[in-house]
Amino acid sequence: MEKHEQTKALVMIFPISKGDFQSAGEASSEIKNKLLQLGFPGNLIRRVAIATYEAEMNLVIHSDGGKIRAEINPDAIFIEVTDEGPGIPNLHMAMQEGFSTASEEVREMGFGAGMGLPNMRSCASKFEIVSVVGKGTTIKMVIS
Ligand SMILES: Nc1ncnc2c1ncn2[C@@H]1O[C@H](COP(=O)(O)OP(=O)(O)OP(=O)(O)O)[C@@H](O)[C@H]1O
Ligand SMILES: [Mg+2]
């Protein structure tokens, strides 16, 4: 008899509201817990947790609201982050380590080092970002 393996993807979707520091971090920790439960390797879980946490905080801090979709497959995790604006005027600059437009108030909360996007890129096996000013930003990551 053939060995039965998980073949169907597990999809988790989290809406993230602008300015919601109260629940910030919940989506990434739910994704992390699910991966722990499913027995994924620690190194992969760590990369997914960092990438989704940074994405989640960027939605809270910089976006007008959006969502995170995580698709868990046995051999790869697909993360898609979409928001409803305001978009990023200069993606090249936004991707540089240390670039941040975070307010003084947000910096006092410990954010705004300008490391979120560079961290996402380095945690991901594949990283894609598309942003249109006035429309929104979409990030697609594959972590395997
Ligand atoms: N979803 C988004 N919508 C609009 N602008 C964004 C979005 N994500 C990032 N940005 C812009 O890109 C900049 C860099 O983002 P990045 O996550 O690298 O740093 P940060 O959020 O400012 O600081 P840190 O992530 O270290 O707390 C932000 O300061 C902001 O100007
Ligand atoms: Mg950030």
Image (cartoon, helix red, strand yellow):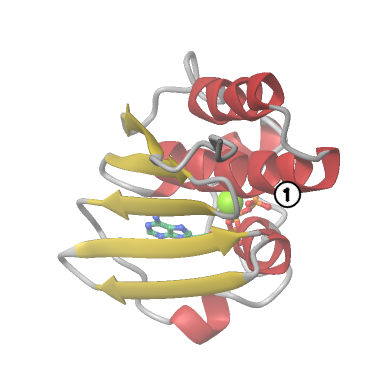
Residue 141: x, y in percent?
A: 51, 62
User: Dividing the picture into quarters, in which one does residue 16 lie?
Assistant: top left
- Residue at the bottom extreme, as displayed: 92
Q: Dot 1 surroundings within 10 Å: few (below 14), some, or many (20 or more)?
A: many
Residue linked to disc 1? 47
In which quadrant of the rendered view does residue 38 lie? top right
Q: Which amino acid, mark 1?
A: Arg
| The one of 41 and 61 positioned closer to us in this rendering | 41
In this picture, is 16 found above or below 115?
above
Asked if 115 appears above or below 90 in the picture, the reply is: above
At x 64% / y 28%, what residue is drawn? 32
Q: Which residue lies most toward the front here?
A: 1
Q: Where is residue 23 in the image (x, y as percent from the top left)?
A: 47, 16
Residue placed most toward the observer, 48 or 38:
38
In this rendering, would 85 be left or right of 33?
Answer: left
Residue appearing at x 29%, y 65% in the figure: 87
